[in-house]
Image: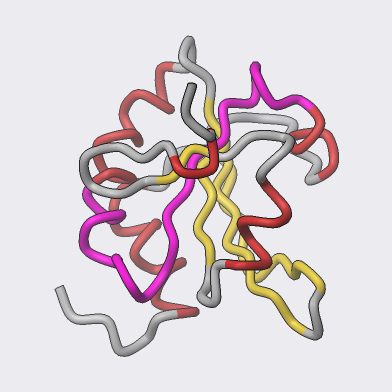
Amino acid sequence: MTDSATKTSQTGAIHLTDATFEQTIKDAGMPVFVDFFAEWCGPCKLAAPIVEKLAGEYQGKAMIAKVDTDENRDVAIKYGIMSIPTVIIFTVEDGKIKEVDRKIGFPGEGGYRQMLGKVVPEHKE
């Protein structure tokens, strides 16, 4: 059995769990874009290939992660996830996890790029 924190897709999106979420964010050393989703969610399925694409493009500049809210309810509750998909960008300041931006619903690729642009402004596609 592999550790869930290191389970990645082909392009690098990391799948986080209740057990690995906080430590992975704290250890990232870069902004972390987290897609809160569920397998049954239609808009989440539309977002998934874009999240995977961004994971490859932003490698080394921002960590792209996913949290299945059905399997990881504690994290979803802690961060007030009431609707999916929800994407939150986190950073760490003084050892504390800080929410930088949040989008509820699927804003399209442009919406996700706009969010990432706030924390990785020099990124070139």
The location of residue 3, given as percent across then percent down, is 53, 34
Identify the image quadrant of the C terminus.
bottom left
| Residue 48 sits in quarter | top left
The residue depicted at 71 percent of the width and 65 percent of the height is 99
- Residue nearest the observer in this picture, 47 or 15: 15
Label count reads: 0
Q: Residue furthest front?
A: 1
| Residue 96 sits in quarter | bottom right
The location of residue 122, given as percent across then percent down, is 30, 89
Classify 111 as above or below 96.
Answer: above
Instruction: Determine whether, in the image, residue 7 is placed left or right of residue 70.
Output: left
Classify 99 as above or below 93.
Answer: above
| Residue 70 sits in quarter | top right
Instruction: Determine whether, in the image, residue 100 is placed left or right of residue 73.
Output: left
The location of residue 92, given as percent across then percent down, is 69, 75
- Residue nearest the observer in this picture, 100 or 17: 17
Q: Is residue 117 magenta?
A: no
Instruction: Determine whether, in the image, residue 66 is placed left or right of residue 121.
Output: right
Q: What segment carries the magenta color?
A: 53-73
Instruction: Determine whether, in the image, residue 9 is placed left or right of residue 68.
Output: left
- Residue nearest the observer in this picture, 3 or 31: 3
The residue depicted at 67 percent of the width and 43 percent of the height is 20
